[in-house]
Image (spheres, helix red, strand yellow):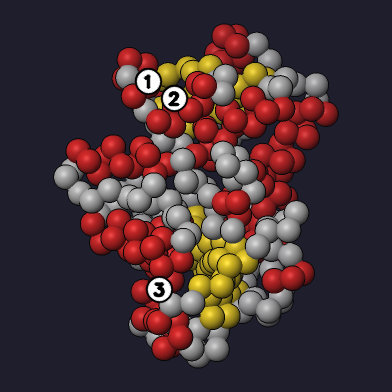
């Protein structure tokens, strides 16, 4: 799979002598794109190997993962079940672009309270799901497991050895762990968490023993799905300049962070950066509903 690296040519980068390319993983598939495609690749093969034709997974109202599992199930003939955080959504999911998309691609929903959702890894809770739905292949929330990390190790290839730093947004840690494992000895991997909290270091360390990485924790904008006018303006300006759409939860925060660090002269001159576009563009519609309620500018679609 030949994924293009798009060179970003803007005045700030030229002024600072920093080279930036974006690996356009968002172009893999219109709906199953970026790291979601990578994470699901080997999980689907494992489900087929085990003879399972039902995929069950977990996610919130605007989850890229929920949308991707529904769409890949539709394409490859799996029945899909989404355990959705927030039982109040049972009455309003039709107004949610992500859940509506998942439903249109055949996903069956099981809405649970937030307190029950926290039990998603408990054996008793999983037994209840099996009693209700029968046997299924379980894909974890966000898609991260050993097979997902294996898939994400394929993002960076031998053609990318020219880069000094590989940058990636971080959610559950699986994607960045794959990048860490596949990076060349001279390369550093910088992860930009989209969530608040310091649990990610331990989580990433479950999937790698290498030390060629660091987390940049200053650009989460308050936590997952939190955005402000400054971030929206950046995403819209970036799209206008480069023709590249960014999602507000992950890649928008990633690129905002990279440009801010470039502006602060954190990167020496002649540094070559590769940023991974992890897709997630389906989330723009849902975020625009939130922005509209807050009377904030909307993201360009």
Sequence-first tag of 3 and 2:
2
Residue 193 visible in the shown view: no
Residue 232 visible in the shown view: yes
The Cα atoms of the two marked residues, 3 and 2, are separated by 34 Å
Reading the image, the residue beneath label 3 is 259
| Residue at 60 percent of width and 51 percent of height | 27
Residue 100, label in figure: 2
| Residue with the most extreme left position | 295
Question: How many residues crowd around disc 1 within 10 Å: few (fewer than 14), some, or many (20 or more)?
Answer: few
Question: How many residues crowd around disc 3 within 10 Å: few (fewer than 14), some, or many (20 or more)?
Answer: some
For label 3, the SS is helix
| Residue with the most extreme right position | 49
Vertically, is 164 above or below 119? below
The Cα atoms of the two marked residues, 1 and 3, are separated by 37 Å
- The location of residue 259, given as percent across then percent down, is 40, 73
Reading the image, the residue beneath label 1 is 94
- The location of residue 271, given as percent across then percent down, is 55, 84
The Cα atoms of the two marked residues, 1 and 2, are separated by 6 Å
- Give the mark count: 3
Q: Quadrant of residue 293?
A: top left
- The location of residue 72, given as percent across then percent down, is 64, 32
Sequence-first tag of 1 and 3:
1
For label 1, the SS is helix
Q: Quadrant of residue 33?
A: top right
- Left or right, 222 with respect to 301, comes to left
- Left or right, 62 with respect to 179, comes to left
Cβ–Cβ below 8 Å for labels 1 and 2?
yes
């Amino acid at each position: 799979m030949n994924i293009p690296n798009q060179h970003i040519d803007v005045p700030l980068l030229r002024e600072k002598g920093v080279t930036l390319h974006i690996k356009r993983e968002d172009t893999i598939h219109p709906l199953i794109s970026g790291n979601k495609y990578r994470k699901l690749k080997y999980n689907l093969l494992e489900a087929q190997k085990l003879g399972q034709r039902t995929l069950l997974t977990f996610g919130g109202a605007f989850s890229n993962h929920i949308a991707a599992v529904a769409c890949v199930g539709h394409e490859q003939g799996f029945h899909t079940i989404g355990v959705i955080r927030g039982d109040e959504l049972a009455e309003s999911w039709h107004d949610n672009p992500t859940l509506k998309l998942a439903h249109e691609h055949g996903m069956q929903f099981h809405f649970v309270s937030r307190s029950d959702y926290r039990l998603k890894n408990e054996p008793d809770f999983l037994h209840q799901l099996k009693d209700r739905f029968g046997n299924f292949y379980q894909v974890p929330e966000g898609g991260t497991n050993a097979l997902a990390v294996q898939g994400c190790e394929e993002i960076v290839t031998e053609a990318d050895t020219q880069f000094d730093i590989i940058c990636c947004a971080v959610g559950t840690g699986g994607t960045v762990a794959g990048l860490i494992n596949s990076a060349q000895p001279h390369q550093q991997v910088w992860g930009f968490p989209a969530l608040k909290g310091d649990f990610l270091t331990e989580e990433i360390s479950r999937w790698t023993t290498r030390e060629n990485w660091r987390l940049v924790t200053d650009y989460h904008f308050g936590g997952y799905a939190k955005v402000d006018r400054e971030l929206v303006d950046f995403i819209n300006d970036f799209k206008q300049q480069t023709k590249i759409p960014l999602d507000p939860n992950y890649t928008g925060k990633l690129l905002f962070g990279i440009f801010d660090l470039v502006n602060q002269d954190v990167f020496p001159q002649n540094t070559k950066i590769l940023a991974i576009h992890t897709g997630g563009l389906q989330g723009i519609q849902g975020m625009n509903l939130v922005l509209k309620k807050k009377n904030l500018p909307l993201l360009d679609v």
